[in-house]
Amino acid sequence: MKMRHLLIAAAGIAVGVTGVTEAKRAYADDLFFPVMVYRTGAYAPSGIPQANGVRDFLEMLNKRDGGIQGNKLVSEECETKYNTKIGVECYEKMKNKHGGAMFINPNSTGLTYQLIPKASVDQIPILSSGYGRTAAADGRVFKWIFNFPSTYWSQASAFVNYVGQEVGGLDKLSGQHIAHVYHNSAYGKEANPTLEALSKKYGFKFTGLAVDHPGQEQKATWLQIRRKKPDWVFMSGWGVMNQVAIKEANSIGYPMDKFVGNWWSGSDADVIPAGDGSIGYKSTAMHAPGTNTQAHKDILKYVYNGDLAKAKENAFGEVLYNRMVNTYTFATEAVRDAVKAAGGKRPSGEQVRNAFENLKMTKERMAARGIAGFSWPLNVSCKNHEGDSPGIFVQQWDGKNWKLISDFIPAMNDVVRPMVEKAAAAYAKENKITPRSC
């Protein structure tokens, strides 16, 4: 009897080993992309287009190219409800699936802050593209964190650069009054240090006005705007906060062409609810609006079989959908470089990290990947995980569509980079990190 049990146990172990072997073989060369989404909750209007953009872009690569360098792409969504605690749970659940994540896009500044210490331990790169902790641009301290193609501090400085252009030069900023209406969170506060530093340098008055989550009650904020009469309003909002702000600004007669949201405050969901009252509203952007790129044409062809109406039902071409097309074009090109470095096989976390750190997106490479003219070239380095040419475009809502109204506007690197290095050094000291030599 004992022998029979032993034989059964042995057979079970054999089956188990075979099953594990087959499972490993099944994803031996698959490239896993966990996707943190918030299709539900207060921020769903902003989360859904992003989730659809990632899904469609990765599906297009599988159907058009067979994945990356012959490796199939596997993705899986995890619903975070834009809640940091739930997001951390998603990360822990997803990080080791399908042989391990290529990288993590937290899709939340709060979640990024929580994952930064985990990245080096788990050896999974974190890509917080245009959000997260700005100091992570210093790759000497934040080896596993990347925030290309631009950061909140660079964006804020480029916005001030834009205002300078509009008023006739940076020397004309003295005497101007800029208000910052911001989501009262780690995300919303990120731009404040830059705006404060630039107000001292250029002599403009700066006022910060916090709006509590989720941002549906802002009457007191806009009464202050009406009383203080700032020349410009910059907004770092998210979700329903943005459309409410635009409606409130319109209700007090604030000129829309002097109201500029950041790149998380300039989507279709932000302006359409305000109707004609949103006409003239502006926002910064890290890519062009619309569906004119080859990548969009390929998504329409391979994912929607040419059915434009169906594609539009899924937010095809909306700003935040496009945000993910841009982000994942850059990210998957880094993964492509890592696969090549791994001899065509699934790369290690260190190989992906190294590829992110050495990513070069020239105009020619962007054109080859179907996003010619969609964003600006990118050159990441060990020292600079933001890329060496941060900045913004400015777009404006005409009542039906977003239109680019500026050329590329560079960030003020002479101001921002020293701030980044100072903040990174403080983080390194606090966390007992020895910065790398680059």
Image (tube, grey):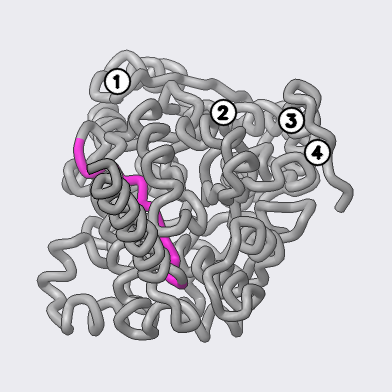
C-alpha distance separating marks 3 and 2: 27 Å
Q: What residue would you read off at disc 2?
A: 177
Which tag, 3 or 2, sits closer to the chain's start? 2
Q: Residues within 10 Å of mark 4 (few under 14, many from 20)?
A: few
Residue 339 x %, y %: 57, 74
- The residue under the point 70% across, 33% down is 198
Amino acid type, callout 1:
Gln
Pointer 1 residue? 218
Residue 422 picture location, percent across and down: 79, 31
- Secondary structure at numbered mark 1: loop
Pointer 3 residue: 423
Whether the residues at callouts 1 and 2 have beta carbons within 8 Å, the answer is: no
Residue at horizontal 28 percent and vertical 58 percent from the top: 398
The residue range painted magenta reads 29-40
Q: Amino acid at mark 4?
A: Pro
Q: Report whether 71 appears left or right of 306.
A: right
Inter-mark Cα distance, 1 to 3: 32 Å
Distance Cα–Cα, label 3 vs label 4: 9 Å
User: Does the segment drawn in magenta span residue 142?
Assistant: no
Badge nearest the viewer, 3 or 4:
3
Looking at numbered disc 2 in the image, what kind of residue is underneath it?
A: His
Q: Are marks 4 and 1 in contact (CB under 8 Å)?
A: no
